[in-house]
Image (cartoon, rainbow, N blue to C red):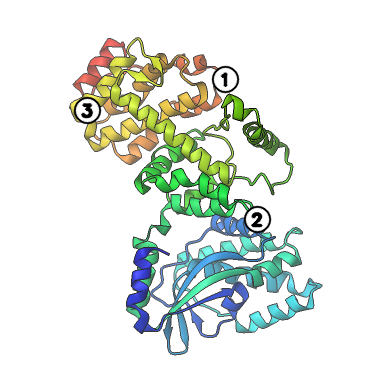
Amino acid sequence: MTTKTMHLLKQVEVAELFKEIISVGELLAKPGLEIPQYQRPYKWTGKNINQLFDDIAIHKDKSSYRLGTIVFHQEGDRKNIVDGQQRTISLLLAVRALIKLRRDGLDRKDLKEQLKMLEQLMMKPRFESTISKVNIHNNYLAVSRIISRSDFTEELIDFLLNKCKVVTFVLNDISEAFQFFDSQNARGRDLYPHDLLKAYHLREFGTGNEQLKTSTVARWENSESYELASLFSQYLYRIRNWSKGTSARYFGKDDTPLFKGVNIETVAHFPYVEQLRIAHHFVDDYNLQFERRIDGHSLDFPFHLNQIIINGCRFFEMTAHYQEKVARINAGSKQGALVGNEGLNGYANTIMDTINTYPGRNRTGDEYVRVIFNCLLIYYIDKFGYVEISRAIEKIFIWAYSLRLKMQVVQLASMDNYVLENNNLFRLIKESTRPSDFINCNIPAIDKNNSSKTEEIEYLFKKMSYL
């Protein structure tokens, strides 16, 4: 819980704050549960439903699994849901589907009786919003498909109803309830996407690994929050999406599944996992051999920007790996002479000096163009190292800064659309097997310059015969 939240709790002690950890079954059976009219529409989609039930299935062997927080405003006999309505409605839909599609065929009498009881006790909310009605209809069908599968066993039904739990807070004053909601969701750091990823991957560590957990996340804890936010939103999120031909404008909570992958210890032996499993165990085994005490060598895991994420320890190692790579690129960019340990030739040195010094470089549009340049350079080095790096920088510069010369105003949408619609070089790197596959691609020359404060960029384009 954040410091601000703890401070607020002290403020609202007079409001008779009541905290309770209860199961999904207990939540839905609560008397007086209501969704007030002032709540926003129900906006969860099938993607959210599938993610929720994927998470539940992954953790089904645990003694319990925490689904989140619900905040109530107690108003007489009614418990109005102030925060957590999206999750509550989704769980309500799941239990409704279980009652209709599975209850009569269950072998376990205790589950049958529990579902009969819930059918009588569960709230029956009404929705006026068309958005809510459409999403409820679609999500009921989605959850019906999930609970009808043969792998949604009676044990999993029991886990959902009785071992999946939520933390509930009940406040008597409506203003205090909304204040508490705001402290959790608006001001608190717990909603930053990278913090949600941290919490997820900490849970993915095996039991008994507290020492490993502490040492692995040390770099994360020592990093400024804005540095981690920038790493994921500016670099990792955009590179992974653009290389797939997918839009990458804002990195938010709904995008965190992009950085959730497989747990090597629990995932089945699918063919696609085996290369990850081999590399994972080989690196650990090599570094633990007694010879390493003599030769001092260590082997880093061979991370790649497009690879499937390995949950837990490797996620934090991957984060540290790319923090160092981004820092190295930025340091080389500021020097304007070196990228890594390789000297630059051709126009590459001039390019690096120019993009770091030209007068318009700090305009919003120019910074968007620089994002394209930095991301593509990191992606190239991640795949091919520093082989032909000078020629790669020339190609990346022409492609990225063509956007700056073509448009008078560059916005976030301009950047995103340009990458996806103009010979997407991120996809080209992804599909390339040799540096020459990328370096020899054809980029058309620019007919005229529609921008201003870019004379130095224009001069380089002319010198390189692209304007």
The relative height of residue 388 versus residue 375 in the rendered view (above or below) is above
Residue at mark 3: 451
Which amino acid lies under the numbered mark 1 shown in the image of this protein? Thr
Query: 361 and 37: which one is in front?
Result: 361
Residue at mark 2: 58
- Image coords of residue 203 (percent x, y): 57, 55
Quarter of the image that includes the C terminus:
top left
User: Does the rendering let one see residue 373?
Assistant: no
Q: Earlier in the sequence, mark 1 or mark 2?
A: 2
Which amino acid lies under the numbered mark 2 shown in the image of this protein? Ile
Query: 300 and 444: which one is in front?
Result: 300
For this view, does 44 lie left or right of residue 334?
A: right
User: Does the rendering let one see residue 192?
Assistant: yes
Disc 1 secondary structure class: loop
For residue 75, the mark is none
- Image coords of residue 211 (percent x, y): 56, 50
The relative height of residue 123 versus residue 299 in the rendered view (above or below) is below
The relative height of residue 219 versus residue 3 in the rendered view (above or below) is above
